[in-house]
Structures are given as C-alpha cells and as structure tokens.
Image (cartoon, rainbow, N blue to C red):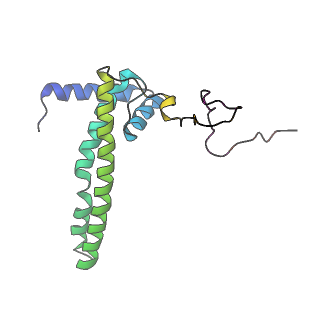
Amino acid sequence: MAKSPDEKQRNRELQEQFANLVHDERRAIMKAVNRGRAVEVRRHAPLAVMIAQRQIRFWRWAWLIAPALGVGQLFWAEAEVALMNGLFGTLVLVTLAWYWVRRARQSVAANTALQKGRVGPPSASDTRPRTDTSSDDAQTPATSPRPPTPRGRKRRDRRQP
C-alpha cells in the first residue's frame, strides 16, 4: 500500500519531532510502545503511534532474515545443517515478530484512543495490586493504599560512622 505525499510529509514531521525530544521523553515513548501501553503525556500519543507503526513494518519483514541466512549457508555448509539452522532461526524470528507486532498493535490502539480523548493515561494505581478486603487485620485497613515497594537490591550508605 503506497502512502500519499501528505502521509509521507506527516510521517517526516513526526520523525523530526521525535528526534528533537529530550532523551528521557524519547525513552518514555519507546518504553510505552514496547510494553503495548499508552504514553503518559497525551501530546506524545501521535509520536508513539508513528513509532509503533514503524516497528510493525520492521517486524513484518524481519523474520525473512533467517530463511535467507539458511539459503546462504547452502554454499558452504551441508544441506541438513543449513536447513536446521534456517528452520530454527525462522521459528525464533517468527515468534519474536509475532510478539513485538502484537505489542505494537496494542500500543497503536491505546495511543489512538488517547489521541481521541477516550481514555486517560495509565496511572500507578492501575498496576498496583489491590489490597484484600476480606482481611481482619486491624492495623492495615483494606482502604489504605500500600506504600511502594523498592525494586532491586537495597543500597546502604557506606559512609556510616
């Protein structure tokens, strides 16, 4: 499907806007697209849609690298080895392509909805596990939010006297 000159121009403008963003903003957009989610900042939604569509275009054809390498190995390796390498590589890349295309399509849907104002950006409360309402523990009521849990190892100050 060929793009019209207007679509190409719009895509170039979006790519230029993306390139002019600060590193942290570009990273936030890429993280959202790779996770199949909407971006936090609503004005970045068109950029996220553009990035997701670019990833879909890439992965639609990237899986063909493995069969091409398998055919290329026929010139210097045994046919069975080249066939097995080609099949294994194709299986791996098709699986990766399916996964990343699925995530990119989820991101396109979420960011398109965000652009049209149908949903808000994801909040931290959406990902936090809910507290159990049936617990009889009087110290932690079910309505109070749990404090955030630090991830990774805890770092202690080494300069303690």
Residue 25 at what x, y percent from top left? 44, 28
* Callout count: 0
Residue 102 appears in which quarter of the rendering?
Answer: top left
Closer to us: 52 or 133: 133
Closer to us: 144 or 115: 144
What residue sits 36% from the left and 29% below the top?
A: 19
Residue 117 appears in which quarter of the rendering?
Answer: top left
Q: 151 left or right of 12?
A: right
Q: Which residues are magenta?
A: 139-153
Residue 69 at what x, y percent from top left? 26, 64
Q: Is residue 149 depicted above or below 123 in this figure? A: below
What residue sits 30% from the left and 30% below the top?
A: 15
Q: Main secondary structure of the magenta part?
A: loop
Q: Is residue 119 depicted above or below 139 in this figure? A: above
- Looking at the image, the residue that sits furthest to the right is 161
Residue 125 at what x, y percent from top left? 51, 29
On whether residue 121 falls in the magenta region, the answer is no
What residue sits 38% from the left and 22% below the top?
A: 42
The quarter of the rendered structure image containing the N terminus is: top left
The quarter of the rendered structure image containing the C terminus is: top right
